[in-house]
Amino acid sequence: MGADPVGSGHGAAPGGSVPILRVRGLSREFRGFLAVDGVDLDIAEGSVHALVGPNGAGKTTLFNLLTGFLKPSAGSVLLAGGQELAGRSPEAITRLGVARSFQITSLFAELTPHQHVELALASPTGLGWRFWRSDRALARFAERAEELLDQVGLSGHGHVPAGSLPYGSKRALELALALALDPKVLLLDEPTAGMGVEDVDRTSELVRKIRAGRTVVLVEHNMNVVASLADRVTVLQHGKVLAEGPYAEIRHDPRVITAYLGDSHAAR
Ligand SMILES: Nc1ncnc2c1ncn2[C@@H]1O[C@H](COP(=O)(O)OP(=O)(O)OP(=O)(O)O)[C@@H](O)[C@H]1O
């Protein structure tokens, strides 16, 4: 825990706004190996904040710590308002308004996008799809499901089996499922990974649209996406924060260029 007492210590994040997430001394050890090593991080409310870094830097582990999929070995994740997230379950963290996009692997091939979104809306956390709900119970979510599918550009594909959707549409469905939870903080794990240029552009546009009224934290390897979307960028290396700032600044940081970006990005 940092020096600030819970609930009173939400000092200004870089840039002057209040951090919605305040991470202090966050660490995760795997059999003596520190995958995340004493990370301090302020996520400003309403910002898009990118986590970048070379393979194995600890981005996914950090993401899993923020969302409760892993328990930290040490440290604190304070949500504005004073709730400690570290050590809580994913469901509890989701209930507090911090949600991650679902993975394609958690989609059901035979269910339609519409049914997926209805189930997410019907579930208090969106995560506990442990039992099937009746069609009648789900019907009251039909309209909102349509709206969400429309928001992510899937309105024409709402009633086909999710398994038959092209890759980009499956990723869009993941986003719709996360949005069904209406989170204050939306965490996106490599939203453009494996996409062609067209889907990358569409996804960037979508993130720009859905950021309204919320905070977005994304792990992203595509530096063009980071440059166009992120207000702030945290660069991780060996589980530690190597640099932090707006992309325009960090891309010139010699440590970041050496560790991750390479010279071509600095030259742009
Ligand atoms: N469950 C685990 N057990 C042991 N080591 C792990 C575990 N999960 C991650 N690691 C190790 O922790 C380090 C950080 O991994 P992590 O997946 O967080 O990195 P990353 O920055 O997300 O990498 P990538 O960009 O390749 O996804 C790696 O060295 C990885 O091998």
Image (cartoon, rainbow, N blue to C red):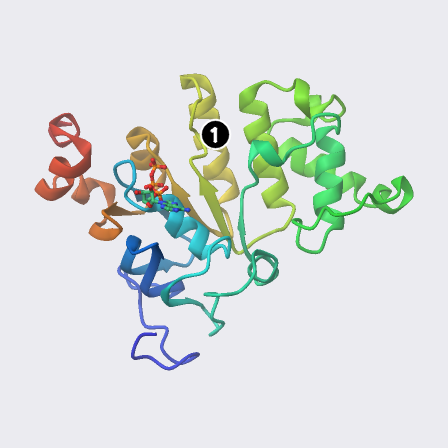
Residue wearing tag 1: 203
**Measured from the top left, where is residue 57 in percent x and y?**
28, 43
Task: Judge from the rendering whether residue 104 lies leftward or rightward of residue 250; answer left or right.
Answer: right
> Residue 101's x, y, as percent?
54, 42
Kindly tell me whether residue 50 is visible in this rendering.
Answer: no
Indicate the position of residue 128 as horizontal and vertical percent values.
69, 50
- Give the answer, above or below, for where 121 lies relative to 66: above
- Tell me the residue at 37%/73% (across/down): 10
> Which three-letter amino acid code belongs to the residue tagged 1?
Thr
The CB of the residue at mark 1 lies under 8 Å from ligand 1: no
> Can residue 138 be seen here?
yes
Q: In which quarter of the image is residue 45?
A: bottom left
- From the viewer's perspective, tell me whether residue 91 is left or right of residue 247: right
Between 179 and 6, the one lying in front of the other is 6
Q: Residue at x 31, y 59 (%)?
A: 41
The quadrant where ligand 1 appears is top left
Q: In which quarter of the image is the N terminus?
A: bottom left
251 horizontally vs 51: left or right? left
Q: Which residue lies furthest to the front in this view?
A: 31
Near mark 1 (Cα within 10 A), the count class, few <14, some 14-19 or many ≥20, is: many
Locate residue 263, reporting x and y percent.
Answer: 11, 28
Q: Which quadrant would residue 149 be assigned to in this image?
A: top right
